[in-house]
Each structure stands twice: as structure tokens, then as C-alpha cells.
Amino acid sequence: MFRKVGIGTLLIFIVLLSACVGGETAPATTSQAVPAPGFEDAPEMIVEDTIDDGMMEGTGEAMEDPMIEGAMEGATDAMGDAMEGTMMGPQTHNIDMSNSGFSPGVLTVKKGDTVTFTNTGSRGIWPASEVHPVHNAYPGSGIQKCFSGGDTSMIFDACGDISPGESYSFTFNEVGTWQYHDHKQVGNKGTIIVEGS
């Protein structure tokens, strides 16, 4: 019996089969001649079908093998991790501000990511870089810049209360660990860890 098998399908099958049998005794195999698609008159290729418990010869049901599924999931996870951050570009992260503090209390982001602080509390909240009351721990920040009439987009300071239901966003372009606080309730603190991109 002859089956048409695409070269890509054949390569995927071989890679998956080799991943499946690595370090184990190879399952029994049978060989059959299969013409290459579009090359029916060309020399034949040999494809080995794996015969294993729970798999029927030649059915292509190898994907039901837990080892192959695990390998595929691992490859998919690795590809997702590689795409996150650098390939996806800058991300936006959220921090909830309430009367009792910030959540999450520690957030790790990449350089160039934006953090949006949303007031979920019942009073005004003023997020700003440490150190109270000058707010100058984050490079270029300082409370005096809030009232100088200049551009405040480059300082980690909301420069005033954020009302309930409102938000304040800041883009972190400096790598490091940056602590911040609520200027109105200094005991409420948080930390942003900025990693290189």
C-alpha cells in the first residue's frame, strides 16, 4: 500500500519520533515504500510506521503519545516565552491602588514597559518615586519638577492625587529596582523591578 507523504510532514514525523524514543528502547517498526508527492516516478522513499501500544500502524495517531504531546507543549511554551517581551514590544502592566496599598506590591517589567496605576480606592492616591517627600529615587524625578511648569512625563511622579476610578501611567526606561509610595499615605509602598529588554 502506498501513501503520499509531504516532505514537511515526513520531517516532523522523524523529529517527533526521535524525540519520543530518545533514551528508550525503540518500538517495533514496519517499512513501506511511499512515493514523494509530485514525484511518483522518482525513486521511492521509505517511511517507518511505529507500532506501539495504543497506536495503529499507519494511522498517524502518534500525537496521542504522551511523550510527543509533552515535547510539543514544551516547544510551544519555549516559543511563547521567546516571543514575550522583546519580540512583542513594550507591554503595559497594571497596579491597583486602594486605601490599603498597591497590588501587586512587587512588579517586574522590561525596560520600555508602561505601568498603569489605577485607583480602586475611595480617596485620592498620589503614586510617586521614593524617597518621601522629595520623590527623587528614580533618575530625573523630583517633586519640584511637578510644579515647575515643565514636561512631567519623564518623572516617576503623578504630581497630585489620582481620583477614585482614574489612573496614572508611567513608562520605565531605567533598569533597576525602583521603590515608590503613596505621597498621601507614606506607609503604602511598592516596588517596580525593571529588567533590560
Image (spheres, helix red, strand yellow):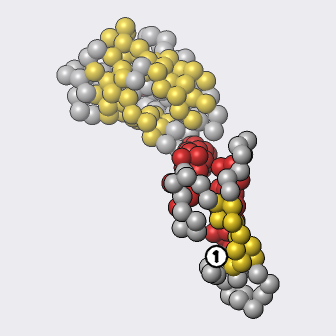
101 left or right, relative to 145 = left
Rendered location of residue 2, percent (x, y): 64, 81
Disc 1, SS: loop
| Residue at point 48%, 26% (across, down) | 107
Q: Which residue is mark 1?
A: 5
* Residue 183 position (above or below residue 53): above
| Residue at point 54%, 63% (across, down) | 56
| Residue at point 55%, 52% (across, down) | 53
**Amino acid type assigned to the residue bearing label 1 in the image:** Val
Rendered location of residue 184, percent (x, y): 32, 13
Rendered location of residue 155, percent (x, y): 50, 29
14 left or right, relative to 85 = right
* Residue 64 position (above or below residue 3): above
Task: Please state the total of marks drawn on the protein image.
Answer: 1
149 left or right, relative to 98 = right
Q: Most extreme residue toward the right, as rendered?
A: 43
144 left or right, relative to 160 = right
| Residue at point 51%, 54% (across, down) | 54
Q: Quadrant of residue 94?
A: top left
Mark 1 crowdedness (10 Å alpha carbons): few <14, some 14-19, many ≥20: some
| Foreground residue among 67 and 52 | 52
> Which quadrant would the N terminus be assigned to in this image?
bottom right
